[in-house]
Every structure is written in C-alpha cells, then in structure tokens.
Amino acid sequence: MADAKLHTIKLPYPDKGDRTVWIYVPSHSDGEKLPVVYMTDGQNLFDDNSTPHGSWEVVKAVENEQKSGVGNAVIVGIDNGNVWRDSELTPKSIGEVQHLELFCEDFKPEGEIFDNFLMNTVIPYVENNFPVCTDRQNVAVCGSSSGGLMSFFSAVEHHEKFGYAGVFSPAFLCYTREDWAKYLSTKIVENMPYLYIYTGNGDELEEMIFESTEMLYELLEESFYPYDRMNEVILFENAHNEKSWREIFPDFLHTFLSRL
C-alpha cells in the first residue's frame, strides 16, 4: 500500500523557464492505476494562503470520495504564469478577444501554447512517472475563469484524450456569439467529453460570465453536442472566487468518479 503524497516538480514552459506542477497522489494499492484530473492554477488548489479566499482544498475532496467508497483520483495542478495568466489561458484560434479592459495591457492570447504544454509536456511526464490511467474515460481536465475557458478548449480540441471537463465560471465572454458558433461548428463529433459547466451569479463579473455561459450552452445544443454529456450547474448566490470553486469542486469530482 502506498501512502498519499503531494509532489512538486518543475517542467520547462515554452520561453518562460520552468513551471511548477503539483501532483497529489492519494493512498492506493501497489500497482493500482488511478483516474487523473489535470487542472489550471495549481498554486490555488493546495495552498490555503494562496488567495484571500483560501484554496480549492482538492485533497480534502479526494479524501472524502475515497472514504465514501466512490473512488480515488490523482490531481495534477499547473501553476499559472502570474502576470501572464490570462494570456496563457486564452486561446487565439476561437476568435478575436473581447472585453480587453478585463486584462492587463500586455495581454496577448497564447492559449494554444498552454494547451501544447499540457498535452506534450505535463501529461506525458505524469503518465510516465505516476500511477495514472491513460484511457480517456479516466482522464479529466478542470479550471476556473480563464482556466475554465482553457479546460473547455483543451477538452474539445482533444476529445480523444479527455472524457470529462470541469468548466467553472468560464470566460466564454472573451468571444462573440458568432465566433463561438463558427468554432463549435468545426469541432463537435459524436464522442465528446462530458461537460460539467458551473457558474454563479453573485457579483458583477460572475453575472457577465453567467450570461455568456447561457449563450454558449445554447450554441452547444444548436451544434448537436450530445445532450447526455452536458451538465449545467448554477449557484446564483456564488461570486467569482476560490470559495465558490472550492464549494463546487467536490460535486464535479464525485460526478467524474461515480460515472467511471
């Protein structure tokens, strides 16, 4: 039996030096392979002092699922790039970015670089060094805000790799309805990931995100996204912060593990 352990490693991020990646491996039997969730904003998942609203407390969520007998999972968190976070987590290929007033003046959409880092550096390293499953049904991606947008993008772009996506408070408002419609029309196939899409509505930013998420959900239906692979969760009182994402993450994790 292997004990639970939180690992931190450094992996080379393109043109920005090494990037910290957190890998939480829960207790498990020798030789056991575990489902895995790849997540953005790694520093906010484990460190309660990382934000004014605390962390996501993902270890506690995994432990609760383990104790209840539902399942177990490895959590992989990729640190954000601080001032480059929004640039790293906003793809260019969806369309022209809107609401630039929400970003820093040096903002430049480079989400495809992050996606490449995830797919070709992080995932191969984790699969080669940790006891994780590699089949899509046991692999999820998850994030919030710009990270929610990025998780949606990676899941849609790599539907052959990800069976599930936790899309929390996603920054869908970054693109127009027209650009989203055009993008989705080229991406939807029969075997798409299960989308767990969450928003609140408790502050001004989250209200804007809620409205754009409703728009995106309608477009997914119009694009014939498999209806049984979408789940929209709304907690109207919740604001745009880690407290809210900490509250919703256990339900996403439970949904992921209970459907395996």
Image (spheres, rainbow, N blue to C red):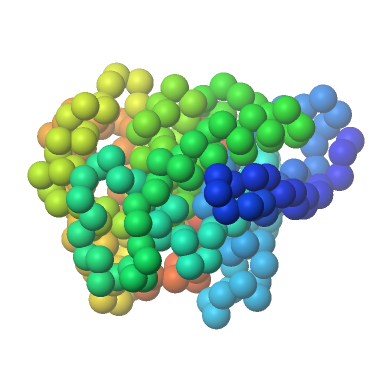
Q: Is residue 195 left or right of residue 132?
A: left
Would you say 26 lies left or right of 249 here? right
Total labels: the figure holds: 0
Residue displayed at 22% across by 65% down: 99
Whether residue 180 is visible, yes or no, is yes
Location of the N terminus by quadrant is top right
Residue ID at (82%, 25%): 31
Q: Quadrant of residue 188?
A: top left
User: Furthest-bottom residue in view?
Assistant: 52
> Which residue, as the protein is rendered here, is positioned at the far left?
178
| Residue 167 visible to an observer of this rendering | no
Q: Position of residue 73 (x, y in %)?
A: 65, 40
Query: Measured along the vertical axis of the image, is residue 126 above or below residue 6?
Result: above
Q: Is residue 222 above or below residue 48?
A: above
Q: What is the quadrant of the C terminus in the image?
A: top right
- Of 5 and 102, which appears nearest the observer? 102
The quarter of the displayed image where residue 209 is located: bottom left
Q: Where 44 falls versus 94 (above or below)?
A: below
Tell me where residue 50 appears, x and y as whole percent.
61, 72
Residue 145, position as x, y percentages in the image:
39, 60
Residue furthest toward the front?
15
Residue farthest right in this picture: 1
- Residue for point 44% across, 22% down: 160
**Residue at image x 81%, y 47%?**
4
Task: Report the side of 79 relative to 209 (left or right).
Answer: right
